[in-house]
Amino acid sequence: MAGETLTIIDNRTGKSLELPIQKGTEGPPVVDITKFYKEFGLFTLDPGFLSTASCKSTITFIDGDEGILLYRGYPIDQLAEKSSFLEVCYLLMWGELPTRPKFEEFSKIVMEHTMLHEQMLNFYKGYRRDAHPMAIMVGMVGAMSAFYHDSLDIQIPRHREVSAFRLIAKLPTIAAASYKYSIGQPFVYPKNELGYVENFLRMLFKVPCAKFTMSPVLVRAMEQIFILHADHEQNASTSTVRLAGSSMANPFAAISAGVSCLWGPAHGGANEAVLNMLNEIGSVDRVGEYIRRAKDPNDSFRLMGFGHRVYKNYDPRARILKKAAHEVLAELGREDDPIFKLALELEQIAQSDDYFVEKKLYPNVDFYSGIIQSAIGIPTNMFTVIFSVARSIGWICQWMEMISGKESIGRPRQLYVGAPQRDYVPLHRRP
């Protein structure tokens, strides 16, 4: 039995075309417009892909109106409360939660890959000390293809799997080394008997002259940040990874492209912008002033950390991190932290103001993640780096799905609005 279709009629010619409607497991159905250009000689124009599905995927689902985020069908709040980041990695990679033996095997493989090739550490010396850590991340992730070329045949499933393990395992080491280099401290090698997140924090903060200890409350908060950032459907950086990968580029190059895209302040740099905004406001007494400025269309000030391209409801990730922020500040004895109090006041006023309510400008995940990381002692220029480490598993899984699905190379079309065809005029004849 034929499925549902949408009939399109070209009023210029009277020609009609039936386009098949495809339904997914969740979310709105899509119209398959593959034959649209062939039959009508027309392209569709959808800047920013507001109404266009670029692929089929089984990994992540978002319902922005209801504030729902699912990884492989599992609600994000359940995973953030009960799971670990490595278990979420397994889930995203293989589609199911692991048995205990499978999880132990998976964790062992990941942690055995945490070391970098020693020559890669020499690369850091080529960067200026004041280089942004994201600049280092872009270069170092891409450089992995020069060292781990024994797994670059993307047509071989085993090669794709080995590359995936290496990326998951080595990005924390690369990230921590970029931080250590920027502050003039020696690199810290991984300690594989620790958990994934605790190992990363140790590589960030350990110094040779002192013992490293980290409160389980702080480790758990960072674990939740990692889980909540692991994947987020076809966002800008994920789409970049899939597009780069569609050219058959090696996985390290594709992930490096994703890191570059994430660096943008409109994407991965938003939590840094939130903290900068809170510091600019400075005091609860000035919240009203900045709320008025945010509503003024002629004022360049914008409230960072509110609203989301997809979520038109409270970002489910923000609820989790708001609770985690309370726990972290209580653990550190900083319940009266002025920045956190300012954030709570800003959220309360924004949610009771008709302007923000009507525009559905709820707090998003970036609003609290920066507060947590700052309280732990992570500098703002590392926020996006940490985002990239967490998101690496999502990029990898999206890349693997794209490669195994044998998708064609990405080639968006355009509406050309430049000069029409014209003839070249020699230089001596131009006025």
Image (cartoon, grey):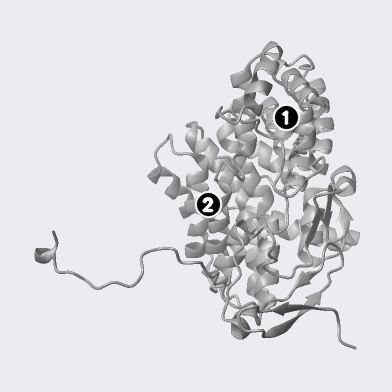
Q: Residues within 10 Å of mark 2 (few under 14, many from 20)?
A: some
Q: Quadrant of residue 381?
A: top right
Residue 178 image point, x, y percent: 52, 41
Where residue 385 appears, as percent x and y from the top left, is: 59, 43
Residue where numbered disc 1 is placed: 213
Q: Is residue 51 left or right of residue 323?
A: left
**Which type of secondary structure does the marked residue at label 1 adopt?**
loop
Image point 82% across, 21% down: which residue?
A: 330
Lower position in the chain sequence, tag 2 or tag 1: 1
Residue 194 lies, in percent from the top left, at 74, 44
Q: Residue 418's spot in the image, x, y percent?
A: 39, 63
Nearer to us in this view, 404 or 318: 318
Work out whether 348 lies above or below 15.
above
In the rendered structure, which amino acid carries the disc numbered 1? Thr
Secondary structure at badge 2 equals: helix
Amino acid type at circle 2 is: Ser
**Of the pair 415 and 330, the residue shown nearer to us:** 415
Q: Which residue is mark 2?
A: 260
Q: In the rendered image, which quarter contains the N terminus?
A: bottom right
